[in-house]
Amino acid sequence: MGIARTTFVIGPDGKIKHLFNNVKPEGHADEVLAYLKSAS
């Protein structure tokens, strides 16, 4: 079964804005940062 990692991006209103499913730790921070820069 293993581990399923998920990252939630939560907006200032407290609602989930984006979901990253089954993420791998390597490079994921860069992926999230790129999303945040493009979403703003």
Image: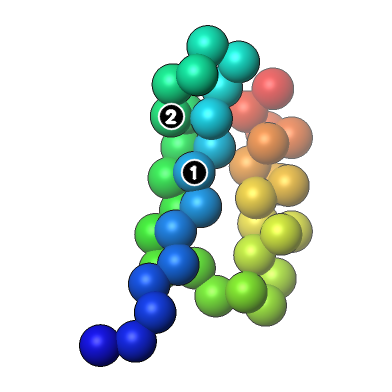
| The label number, if any, that marks residue 29 in the structure image | none
Q: Secondary structure at mark 1?
A: strand
Amino acid residing under circle 2: Ile
Q: Earlier in the sequence, mark 2 or mark 1?
A: 1
Amino acid residing under circle 1: Phe
Residue 4 is situated, as x and y percent measured from the top left of the image, at 38, 72
Look at the numbered discs 2 and 1 and tell me whether their residues touch, using CB distance below 8 Å.
Answer: yes
Q: Residue at the spot x=46%, y=37% of the render? A: 18
The quadrant of the rendering that contains the C terminus is: top right
Structural distance between the alpha carbons of marks 2 and 1 = 7 Å
Q: Is residue 28 left or right of residue 19?
A: right
- The residue tagged 2 is 16
- The residue tagged 1 is 8
Q: Residue at the spot x=49%, y=43% of the render? A: 8
Crowd class of label 2 (few under 14; some 14 to 19; many from 20; radius 10 Å)? few
Q: Secondary structure at mark 2?
A: strand
